[in-house]
Amino acid sequence: MTEHKVTMESTLKVLLEQKKYSTLKDILVTMNPTDVAELFEEIADDRLPRLFRLLPKELAAETFVEMQPEQQELLIRGFSDAELRAVVQELYVDDAVDLVEEMPANVVRRILAQADPDMRKDINDLLRYPENSAGSIMTTEYVSLHPKMTVIQAIERIRKTGVDKETIYTCYVTDSRKLLGTVSVKDLLLATDDSMPVSAIMDENVISVNTLTDQEEVAQMLSKYNFLALPVVDTDGLMVGIITFDDAMDVLVEETTEDIEKMAGMLPSEKTYLRSSAWDLFKHRIPWLALLMVSATFTGMIITGFESALAAQVVLTAFIPMLMDTGGNSGSQASVTIIRALSLGELDFADTPRVVWKEIRTAVLCGCALALLCFCKIMLVDRLLLGNQDITTMTAFVVCFTMAVTVLIAKMVGCTLPLAAKRAGFDPAVMASPFITTIVDALSLLVYFGIASALLFN
Amino acid sequence: MTEHKVTMESTLKVLLEQKKYSTLKDILVTMNPTDVAELFEEIADDRLPRLFRLLPKELAAETFVEMQPEQQELLIRGFSDAELRAVVQELYVDDAVDLVEEMPANVVRRILAQADPDMRKDINDLLRYPENSAGSIMTTEYVSLHPKMTVIQAIERIRKTGVDKETIYTCYVTDSRKLLGTVSVKDLLLATDDSMPVSAIMDENVISVNTLTDQEEVAQMLSKYNFLALPVVDTDGLMVGIITFDDAMDVLVEETTEDIEKMAGMLPSEKTYLRSSAWDLFKHRIPWLALLMVSATFTGMIITGFESALAAQVVLTAFIPMLMDTGGNSGSQASVTIIRALSLGELDFADTPRVVWKEIRTAVLCGCALALLCFCKIMLVDRLLLGNQDITTMTAFVVCFTMAVTVLIAKMVGCTLPLAAKRAGFDPAVMASPFITTIVDALSLLVYFGIASALLFN
């Protein structure tokens, strides 16, 4: 794929250089709009408008939707009113809304001026829904059928009105905008009797979402039920739009990326990595780094509190990194597993007792196995192989006992914090590795020095 | 949603208790198969066959596909040959393959015995494709049209053969199985002239995948191009099947979960959290925990090497956790960002120089900001507020200088290792937090003691 793109790019550049516009056009019309947009990203800004004008009307609008906001703005600024109008009229309402949300105010005014009154009203309506709600990502262009229409009339209606609809394959049976059922084009085409009313073949068990439903939930429902589209109803139960599977897929990918970023202690970013400047990356990374660094004051205080004991038994210091890291790793295994299960809807707060019990048993297994392995490692590698005679059997026992307790604590903290966050209405993803590590570090040091004090220092 | 499910569950149990089978049936037929399957998960095993037999044929097959393997096996073992045959004949080939892959050998023999010869051949063919390949997730049931058919003939053919196809909305124009183009039902229905040949309205720029293409790549292509289905061709360029968007969505979710599990130092699991036993969790978590614990031998060796110096300056020990954690966090921010960008196809190995340069600048910004903040924190909190007079300005300087260098090293290790893994053909997801933390720990200690030796111990 990538190689193919690179070759195409250089070919296009040469053709552009030689002003072979008709050859260029012949090539572009054979391409998929997504690929055209990807190619255009690599073209110098001053040449972009010229290339874009080569595209036929429909391909132009489809390509425009797939382009990056900076390039869209550049093109709009160069468009005549007529050109802008041609593109805007071809857009689906949800794509128009996405565009308006990205553009500066003066560009938005121009876009709205070129939309026809109906579309302008739809755009303004959709802009009023809260960010990340079903309303904000839906489109108002769907096929609606009346329950009394016959199959043949329904097919006729689809053929007449379908060209402007985002999907024609699921049709919505409504009466005065009240949603009564759905019927697929497959059902219509495969109906044995063309004169049957739509109400006789429609599916009345409609699954719908509200305009205010969270977009992530919508995406998960589409994915769970394998629907092509989900109808959106307002608070009065009247149908206002649909959300199609392709938008749901985009939402799934975006929301997962956000979760992953949060889990790694970053603020989520809307830009792709290569489009983010070092300054952008810095702004997204420094808050958690700074917060976690400052909170390490506690671990520092704990060590300082045991300073004199440590000075007498410096050998204990050597095991601090191993204990802290194993604790951190154990905790993040649990927290990340729980966070993912929460975000896939496999778990909720009511499952807490089951989760805690499962993690206790897992922690006992992991803790015992690690303690045993650790004891062997210390006695064989550290003491025998590396010849560190400061390590007594008692020291090894203290370290291994701490290890087992730390793993248990880490798994407990790791599994309960995301569930508690969910319950409190925070995003569980924030309760991942970095956060857990900081807490587990402090706890594991307290356990370590506590056990050491009891067994070694008296 | 969940509450609704719980109420339904208890209602069904009561009805089942009272043997009100016809009421039960009336309720079940109004439900979506996915929801029926979810409900059945909560029903005791001995009652399941009775409930399942209430479902009409089509709903039964659709529900069966959505059930968990353990329940599928239970049902099959209870089925008569005729019942099994009814379910198997209703399955799409890709679902039948999934089923066969999950069942033990004696159950598989029964399933294959009940499939008709064509289906049995298709199942056996699909089973031969490597795991995670396009061939292994495709279905052979698609609508194929001949280029010389007219629009009206094409619609006729869809109406006649469509009932057994997984999707009818994208049709594939083939001649002797060679893929010539695609035509959507929308194009056919909206065609202005019914007597036009299919070849005149088909889209000849077909994007297809090979049977051996990785399923993750297929899912990303479907998501990128917003296709309902992608055609799969064999090595001779002949069409063998299609992959539909719903399977692609499942693949996206599964592959992301796998990535997240690997990033948290776990072996990927196919079972959901609540279905995994503590023993399952243990087996998936212990390998990385043990490996990383043993590799902490290096950090131990480094500390032991500087033991005498540390004994003289115990105050330095107090900052070890902070330096290690900040290094670990900085490194995982970089590695996780790069791993996600790699898995979304936004980056590849050729971008390494751009990535490294961006990370160097980000690391300098983060490193300087953290060093400054750290200096203030040490002097104000640790020295003034907590009154630790062992901390000199020189100590603070050593810690902060180490901090800046550690952040730089961590970001470099974090961004290069996943790219190198990708290049070497390993899964970059393994190069995430736990792995990076272990390496960065050792490096940061070396830097710390190196700087301390140079500035404090002479």
Image (cartoon, coloured by chain):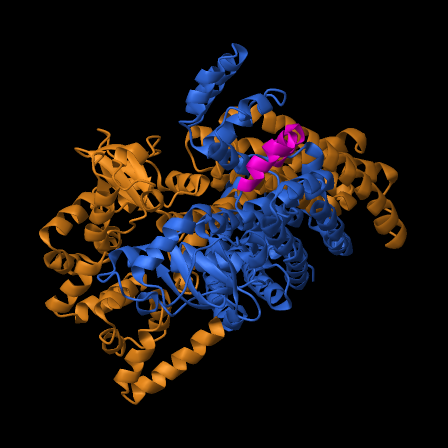
Chain colours: A orange, B blue
Relative depth, front residue between A240 and A277: A240
Residue A278 visible in the current orientation: yes
- Residue drawn at the location 62% of the way across and 49% of the way down: B117
Residue B436 visible in the current orientation: no
Q: State yes or no: residue B98 in magenta.
A: no
Which residue extends farthest right? Answer: A384
Q: Where is residue B251 drawn, in percent x and y? A: 52, 50
Residue A375 occupies quadrant: top right
- The vertical placement of B362 against B289, above or below, is below
For the stretch drawn in magenta, the main secondary structure is helix
Quarter containing the C terminus of chain B: bottom right
Relative depth, front residue between B37 and A277: B37
- Please state if B161 lies on the left or on the right of A355 as rendered: left
Relative depth, front residue between A426 and A76: A76
Relative depth, front residue between B228 and B82: B82
Q: Where is residue A280 drawn, in percent x and y? A: 39, 59
Quarter containing the N terminus of chain B: top left
Highlighted magenta segment, given as a residue range: B69-89
- Residue drawn at the location 33% of the way across and 55% of the way down: B155
Q: Where is residue A273 drawn, in percent x and y? A: 44, 61
Q: Where is residue B359 drawn, in percent x and y? A: 49, 64
- The vertical placement of B337 against A403, above or below, is below
- Please state if B455 lies on the left or on the right of A207 as rendered: right
